[in-house]
Image: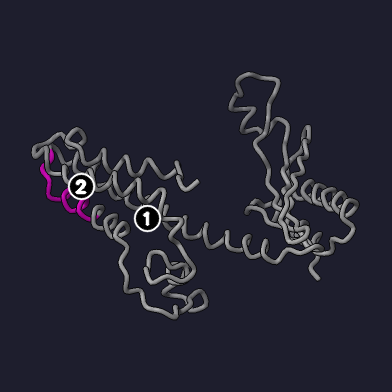
Amino acid sequence: TFLDPRRMPAYYTVVDGETPKKRRGGGAAVFQQTNEGTVIRKNSSCHNYKVHIKESSDIAEHCIVYSMSDGKDKDYRKKCGHLHGIVCENCHVLASTLTDIQTKATTANFATTDDRDEVAYMINFSKLAIESWQCHIIRCVNQDQARIDVLQLLDNDTILVINDWAMKIIPQKYRKSQADWYGKRGISWHISVVYYRINKATHWQAFIHIIQSCSQDSYVVVAIMQDVLATLKSECPQINNVYFRQDNAGCYHSAHTILSCPAD
């Protein structure tokens, strides 16, 4: 989905911070014209921004190479072979709307200094959250490109395995206590989704490992990976190359896990 609910409170906080209720002062219509712009921008940003991001784009906000380049470190910088002369209307509306909100918050009348500081902090924090959310979307698209590249390289003897730990289940209780939840008690589920290609058609197969009790460390992960590969090798003897993809959990990136997967 293109809608990330974790960042949505920032939009509502900005809109709520514009209302007279938070300000408790005069000038009720001071933020009236920016409310509509913020809500419109929320809807367009949630559903359209991700699909417009490309590796190469004439719009600076949509160009992965330009957006991901570090202006201070040349080792993490890459020059674009084109100019960024096109302006995205939605991205421009977002930047200008947030700037207008900040400006009007500084010039508005407040009943007390505490009210002014509260609104200023809320708007600044929400603006940073929205901008960070956009950066997160760009990084997600850039990282997901690696998965797309691997899928295009799949052949009859190459597969892609995506690993992840699912949510734990505590079936003995209707409601989980905090001690059970944070104490990591319960049944662990590990999901392995395998992508492979037969006659140029991509297929997938899921492996679910249910473990009564484990610490979800690298030793368990290696055992699961070995079981998945052994099963696949018995079913498809022609498999010779395997790509693994997982999140940044320590159990997947520890020395034991990496050394257990030698590369040719």
Residue of label 1: 131
Taking depth in this image into account, of 253 and 151 the one nearest to the observer is 151
- Magenta residues span 99-110
Give x and y (percent) for residue 145.
58, 62
Helix, strand or loop at disc 2?
helix
Residue 34 is labelled as: 2
Q: In screen coordinates, is 66 left or right of 222?
A: left
Q: In screen coordinates, is 109 left or right of 193?
A: left
Q: Amino acid at mark 2?
A: Thr
Residue sitting at 26 percent across and 53 percent down?
A: 98
Q: Amino acid at mark 1?
A: Glu
Task: Pick the quarter of the image with the C terminus.
Answer: bottom right
Helix, strand or loop at disc 1?
helix
Per the image, is 105 magenta? yes
Give x and y (percent) for residue 85.
32, 74
Give x and y (percent) for residue 223.
83, 48
Taking depth in this image into account, of 20 and 41 the one nearest to the observer is 41
Per the image, is 191 magenta? no
